[in-house]
Amino acid sequence: MGIFFDKHAPKTFDDLVFPDTEMAARFEAYVKGQSFGHILMHGPHGCGKTTIARMLPHAIAPGHDPNDNYFMYAARDASVARIRELSESFMCGTAWNASGRLFLTLDEADTMSAETRTVMRGGLDQNAKSLMVIMTSNDLSKIDLGIRDRCDVFDFSGGNFTTYLPLALRVLRKEGLHVPQDELDDLVKLHCSSIRQLLRALERVVLGIRKKRWQIAA
């Protein structure tokens, strides 16, 4: 799966898949500098939240200093002490690059403890002109209202057949293969809640078609 997924994973912000055009337009406003602020993305596993979180700082501030972009896995690294340290240093600092932007990403922020979330709420109120905190969550109910209220919230649970069919078609086109439309439609409908699961299913289809071709050729 790794090779196939890496091959077809989004390489640029333009390659990303969003649940609908309205959400795509909201993110585009950030990339164009029309919006700036904290972001909270929530939805099921595999819908692209972490990929977007990694790409967004580079889309907003191309060429920014890597020291002004901090990514952390909340379940592993977001202790009370660490978040307090960041809120008293990085989050209140000033970016040294031309963009003047700081980015802190917390992946799976719903895993933070209640005490850690309290410290984070305070950090979100600092340096509003320069700091963007990007959070992802698989369970919105575990993100308290104080944090939600300070963020622009994006719901990724609405992915559907229309969202992911173009991705499936793009993958098959790159592989140089054709799948009957009714079969492809059924496959996308079955896996339209997760990009990872859809790519796994497409990989099985691609390998199956090629195996049949090799058997016929032999």
Image: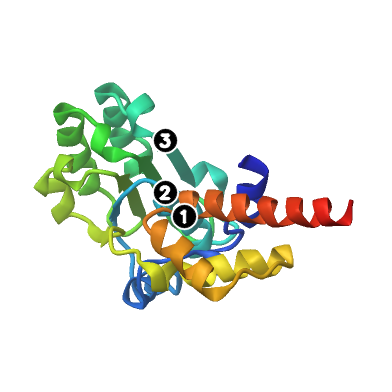
Q: Distance from label 1 to label 2 (Cα)?
A: 5 Å
> The disc labelled 2 sits on which kind of residue?
Gly
Which is more toward the observer, 206 or 196? 206
- Graded by Cα atoms within 10 Å as few (under 14), some (14 to 19) or many (20 or more), the crowding at tag 3 reads some
- Graded by Cα atoms within 10 Å as few (under 14), some (14 to 19) or many (20 or more), the crowding at tag 1 reads many
User: Which disc, if any, is residue 64?
Assistant: none
| Residue identified by numbered label 2 | 46
> The disc labelled 3 sits on which kind of residue?
Met
Residue at position x 34%, y 72% from top? 26
Residue at position x 28%, y 39% from top? 109
| Residue identified by numbered label 3 | 72
Circle 2 — which element? loop
Q: Are marks 1 and 2 in contact (CB under 8 Å)?
A: yes
Circle 3 — which element? strand
Q: Position of residue 21 (x, y in %)?
A: 37, 77
Which is more toward the observer, 156 or 175? 175
